[in-house]
Amino acid sequence: MATKKELAKLYEESFARESIRQDQIVEGRVIQVGDEGVLVDIGYKVEGIIPKGEFKKLPRAGEKVSVYIVKREGEGGLVLLSKKRAEETIIWKNLSESFEKKKTLEGVVRRRIKGGLMVDVGWEGFLPGSHLDLFPRYNLEEFIGQKIKVRIIKLDRRRKNLVLSRRVILEEEKAKAKERIFSQTQVGDILKGKVKSLTSFGAFIDLGGFDGLIHIKDLSYAHLRHPSELLSIGEEVEALVLFLDKEREKISLGLKQLKPDPWEEAEKKYPPGSIVEGKVTTLTEYGAFIELEEGLEGLLHVSRLSSSSYLEHPSQALKVGEKVGVKVLNVDSQNQRMTLDRKSLLWEEMEKKYPIGSRAKGKITGITRFGAFLKLEEGLEGLIHISDLSWEGRIPHPSRIVKEGEEHEVVVLDVNPEEEKISLGLKQLTLDPYEKFKEGMHLKVKVIDIVPFGVFVELERGVEGLIHISQLAKRGVESCEDVISLEEEVRAKIIKVDRKKRKIALSIKEYLLDKEAEEMREYMGSEKEAKTSLRDLMKKKRR
């Protein structure tokens, strides 16, 4: 028969077993770690065992641990416990409470899977890609390893499934921010924010949970191809509120409006005729846009861009980003237009670079009936007029003297910036043959043409002269053919030289009179008589 003491012990053990329910979570204390498992005292003088495999790191004796009662009585009378199931039960209890109360959780993005991300909130849940942000995200991998705020939108405790959303939190934050901004902000206010994203049409600014847009035309007075030329993502900016639309949830902002408009003072700052330096910003078929300062551009038309008249495209003379000197022709602040000129400046430089009388070299680029064009440098051509090609006189065509592609040295005859012309000469490299012929000279000439009023004679190659019919003989002549014939060589005296008009007048009559006077002087044998003219001698002879 059992003693009272033994009966009391059995009663206590029976009471303890009745008090401990299966599927219950209790707190216990580690008694010892054995080969079969971790022995835990769960109260009421009842012990349980946890498989060692449930521990990543085995506990020490005396440590407290939460356990789940799997089976009230197992082998050896011990209660079968599970630490893992206790942790899961607690986690899912907390997750269920968060789901019911719509609490915001913080989780860590673990990995990318098809359709979205897996996020650890104590238990891994699925975050669909469509619920990641307010707008589509295509590079989900950038979120891996990041901590993000999420909310449970679907929970299946039996299947241990969670569906999460970050978007619902962002939508709530946006709604609160929108309400705050629209209730506290007016057009004309200045707001601070961070550049959130950049697009081809502008920049989105995060104003604290709600985005405003700065259109590209409101970023700067300068011409921008893309907002990234001025802003970078994450940059803090101050912007002016231009427009508010609560119903459509839109805020239009401006950055350039915080600065003075450069066109307001343009007419005073850049009067017509002023010479300034600017930067080439855009090249088009019809010209180049030159930025004089931020937001202030002028048009340099293709016709005023180069010293050459044969420019096919501005890119032949200028490059984007290049700095150039220009002259202001006209400023229209109201319509924000400015007309610029570069050609006149280049021609003024040409006047200094190619002074009259200097020599230059170039290549023949074109030949016309009135002359030949010679390229002095890129974009600059001068004209050698047909009359300045040779001293020979009348030339049937310039191609007789020069050929296209030939290189020649020339003399600068004239530079005219107003008409944008440079006149060149080829014949001026040699001495003018007309300089050799002086009035009073006697010489032998050849008849090359006979006309009613006289005969043309050749003094030397390229130099012609005229003997008028009245100068062919001492007496009057009715017809030139009566006293002279073609190809005949005769002696004559030069009686007039007009180098400007390239004309030489000769006289056989004067030559003969000079010869008679010379013979008479020899005859008289007197120095005094030698100085007497032929007419005086004839008068004396008649007496």
Image: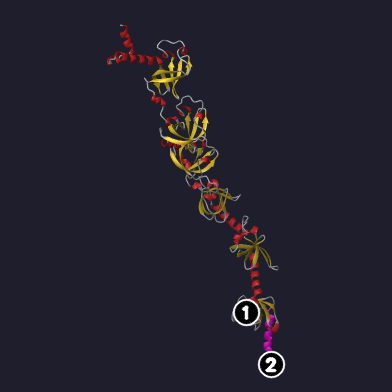
Disc 1 or 2, which lies upstream in sequence?
A: 2
Q: Nearer the viewer, residue 341 or 114?
A: 341
Query: Residue 506 appears at what percent x and percent y?
Result: 41, 18
Determine whether label 1 and label 2 are within 8 Å by CB: no
Is 476 drawn above or below residue 424 in the view shown? Answer: above
What is the chief secondary structure element of the magenta stretch?
helix
Q: Secondary structure at mark 2?
A: loop
Which mark is on residue 477? none
Query: Residue 437 appears at what percent x and percent y?
Result: 39, 23
For marks 1 and 2, give the CA distance: 31 Å
Is 151 drawn above or below residue 475 in the view shown? Answer: below
Is residue 6 a member of the stretch shown in magenta?
yes
Q: How many marks?
A: 2
Is 394 drawn above or below residue 240 in the view shown? Answer: above
Q: Secondary structure at mark 1?
A: strand
Q: Is residue 537 left or right of residue 185?
A: left
Q: Is residue 483 left or right of residue 64?
A: left
Mark 2 residue type: Thr
What's drawn in magenta, residue-wise?
Answer: 1-21
Q: Is residue 483 visible?
A: yes
Q: Is residue 34 left or right of residue 272?
A: right
Q: Badge 1 is on which residue?
A: 28
Please identify the quadrant where the C terminus is shown. top left
